[in-house]
Image: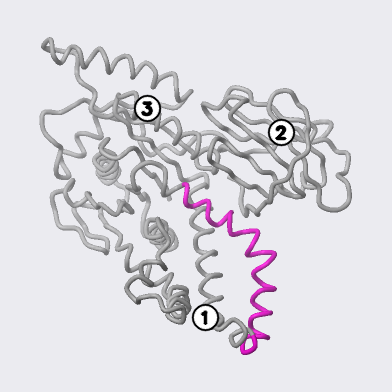
């Protein structure tokens, strides 16, 4: 199954491009589902037909679904929210305010992606196109399983046993109800499902496509999204430059826009390495309906295969050497000054700007020491030597191209899969 996710700054036309790509896939004979995880659903507007919370057929082999995030939230969060509400009730918090406090910001968008897991397990589709929320925020939130991994593996089992054994005593001592087994079960289930989604989206059959318009501010955000997506292990397979003014027959006013866009488009070509950059010209009217969207996609992809699987090994790979190994992590657009690297026991902590990813090293590397690190052509390379690490927890920090090692401390969490 091929999974394509479309993201981009709000208002760049990502929903239109996603809808067109799905329509073109269906026209090519693929059983295609396009679903929206964006709270501001617009797929129904793009296709010009009513679309519900279940897959709705809009053309031959083409189905559309606008995920009911609230329903998914209730299914996956109900037990946890019920416990939190009982705690807030004891604390005297107003019930309406308590319900608001028990909703994690961004949780609805993340939980909506659980729908993708169900469709992948169903085997009913050849292609699934996902119209994500603006920017890469939804995908960034999928780092949640990694952040929870350390807690789920090391703390959660012991905490569950303690609470189960001492629940009556703890309830009286704390003055608030302790979580029951169904709450712990819900946390475990939610974590496992989110982890499956992340593995699915970082796998070889999935990729992200960034949609932008030829504007400097939009391009800057697209660059950051590309870096962040790579940091968290997602493959970006191309960029769509939307609403490009055609140069032909441009009057003086439009000629100025054409010139300004050409300058930004030249930067776009330089910003994304070897990734294809498809262009969609500005149209006098919005493409609405299956036929118009299919025609748009045919023009955008211009004879190339829009469903071609992403090339390469993905953002993360390990290369064996004569003296140890080298860990490679693609960080496009990043320089040595942007990266901070720390080693804490079996975990490697990579920080780029305000974003941090914590990786549990593969078993073959965990016993090696970090010999140095550098950033080369937008790729972080961490060298490991075969000298066994000291017994017990170790903490070391390595910074960029100088291949030097310093000391620092950062807590780590576990990564379950490397893509």
Residue of label 3 = 219
Q: Which mark is residue 182?
A: 1
Residue of label 2 = 382
In this rendering, would 170 be left or right of 203? right
In this rendering, would 408 be left or right of 223? right
Picture coordinates of residue 401, whole percent (x, y): 70, 23
Q: CA distance from mark 2 to mark 1?
A: 42 Å
Classify mark 2: helix, strand or loop: strand
Sequence-wise, the earlier of marks 3 and 1 is 1
Disc 2 vs disc 1: Cβ atoms closer than 8 Å? no
Q: Is residue 355 above or below residue 238?
A: below
Q: Residue at x 37, y 27 (%)?
A: 219
Would you say residue 158 sits in the magenta stretch? yes
Give the magenta range. 140-169
Q: Of residues 345 and 285, which is closer to you in this image? A: 345
Classify mark 3: helix, strand or loop: helix
In this rendering, would 376 be left or right of 132? right
Q: Is residue 376 above or below residue 162?
A: above
Disc 3 vs disc 1: Cβ atoms closer than 8 Å? no
Other-residue count near label 2 (Cα within 10 Å), few / some / many at <14 / 14–19 / ≥20: many
Picture coordinates of residue 248, whole percent (x, y): 16, 13
């Amino acid at each position: 199954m091929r999974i394509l996710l479309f993201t981009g700054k709000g208002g760049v036309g990502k929903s239109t491009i996603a809808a067109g790509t799905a329509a073109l896939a269906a026209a090519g004979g693929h059983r295609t589902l396009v679903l929206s995880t964006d709270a501001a659903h617009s797929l129904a507007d793009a296709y010009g037909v009513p679309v519900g919370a279940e897959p709705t057929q809009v053309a031959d082999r083409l189905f559309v679904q606008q995920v009911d995030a609230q329903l998914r939230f209730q299914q996956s969060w109900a037990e946890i929210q019920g416990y939190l509400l009982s705690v807030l009730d004891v604390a005297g918090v107003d019930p309406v305010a308590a319900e608001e406090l028990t909703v994690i910001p961004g949780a609805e968008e993340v939980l909506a992606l659980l729908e993708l897991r169900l469709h992948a397990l169903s085997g009913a589709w050849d292609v699934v196109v996902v119209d994500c929320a603006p920017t890469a925020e939804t995908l960034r939130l999928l780092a949640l399983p990694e952040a929870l991994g350390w807690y789920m593996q090391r703390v959660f089992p012991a905490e569950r046993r303690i609470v189960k054994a001492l629940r009556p005593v703890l309830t009286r001592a704390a003055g608030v109800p302790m979580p029951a087994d169904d709450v712990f079960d819900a946390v475990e289930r939610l974590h496992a499902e989110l982890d499956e989604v992340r593995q699915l989206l970082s796998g070889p059959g999935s990729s992200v496509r960034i949609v932008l318009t030829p504007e400097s501010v939009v391009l800057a955000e697209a660059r950051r999204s590309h870096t962040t997506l790579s940091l968290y292990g997602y493959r970006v397979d191309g960029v769509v430059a939307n609403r490009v003014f055609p140069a032909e027959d441009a009057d003086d006013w439009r000629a100025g826009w054409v010139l300004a866009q050409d300058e930004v488009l030249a930067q776009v070509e330089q910003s994304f390495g070897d990734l294809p950059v498809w262009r969609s010209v500005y149209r006098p009217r919005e493409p609405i309906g299956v036929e118009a969207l299919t025609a748009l996609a045919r023009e955008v992809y211009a004879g190339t295969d829009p469903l071609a699987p992403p090339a390469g090994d993905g953002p993360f790979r390990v290369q064996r050497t004569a003296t140890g190994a080298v860990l490679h992590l693609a960080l496009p657009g990043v320089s040595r000054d942007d990266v901070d690297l720390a080693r804490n026991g079996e975990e490697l902590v990579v920080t780029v700007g305000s974003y941090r990813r914590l990786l549990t090293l593969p078993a073959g590397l965990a016993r090696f020491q970090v010999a140095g690190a550098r950033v080369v052509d937008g790729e972080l390379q961490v060298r490991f030597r075969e000298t066994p690490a000291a017994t017990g927890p170790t903490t070391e920090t390595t910074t960029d191209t100088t291949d030097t090692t310093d000391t620092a401390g950062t807590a780590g969490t576990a990564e379950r899969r490397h893509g």
